[in-house]
Amino acid sequence: MIRAVLFDMDGVLIDAKDWHYEALNDALSLFGFEISRTEHLSAYDGLPTRKKLELLSQTKGLPRKLHNFLNELKQRRTHEITIQRCRPMFHHQYALARLKRDGMKIAVCSNSIRSTIDVMMKNAALSEYLDFFLSNEEVSAPKPNPEIYVKAIEQCGLQPSEVLIVEDNHHGIEAARKSGGHVMEVKDVYDVTYDRINAAILRAEASR
């Protein structure tokens, strides 16, 4: 029986993929660097900022001495964009409220930093439905490493077979599958509805 649903955040509960892309490029532009849209989708999407900066150093020669400054600048810009654009989406509020009423434990597991998850969940009016959330600050290795999902499953006190994980990008899907949990793949935030999640739960339970 499925007893918990774990959600990625960006692209699943928050339509923030472009926000992170825009915020990092705003910071990089000060030093003449940029991540193209194609590069973002093929290699960078879903990675934590520090991982993106390291990849830029390896592929484009970004000086590593700039990492801390660029990371801080990017986080500030992300916070500004979130305050401006992040709003509740009724179908997400409804889905999480129904799942909670069904007795599910609910958590968010994101490669974002803790403060970003906190402000996005509050602005999206989803915080009240969460049992907890995990950020890249609570794990030693980010997605695609499965550590964050393994840790969340343990924190729920469950076995992987009792958990459904909702993910949208290849790094997150890889992490979810490696954790042993059931995986629901979505294309964007509009795929995340109660009916679709409930159908995925029923499929997972029938597959046992």
Image (cartoon, rainbow, N blue to C red):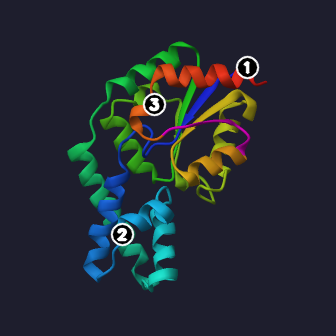
Q: Please tell me the numbered disc located at residue 36.
A: 2
Splitting the image into 4 quarters, where does residue 89 fall? top left
**Disc on the earlier residue, 2 or 1:** 2
Task: Look at mark 1 in the image and give the residue it sits on.
Answer: 206
> In the image, which residues are magenta?
179-186
| Left or right of 147 in this view: 46 | left
Which residue occupies the foreground of this view, 169 or 5?
A: 169
Residue lying furthest top in this view? Answer: 101
Residue at horizontal 64 percent and vertical 19 percent from the top: 202
- Viewer-nearest residue: 156 or 13: 13
In the displayed structure image, the side of residue 101 where residue 141 appears, left or right: right
Whether residue 181 is in magenta: the answer is yes
Q: Give the residue pinned by disc 3.
A: 192
Question: 138 or 23: which is nearer to us?
Answer: 23
Sequence-wise first label, 3 or 1? 3
Q: Position of residue 162 (x, y in %)?
A: 71, 27
In the rendering, at what x and y percent does residue 172 appear? 57, 49
Residue beneath the point at 39% across and 49% down? 116
Label 3 – label 1 distance at C-alpha: 21 Å
Q: Is residue 91 left or right of residue 181?
A: left
Amino acid type of the residue tagged 3 in the rendering: Val
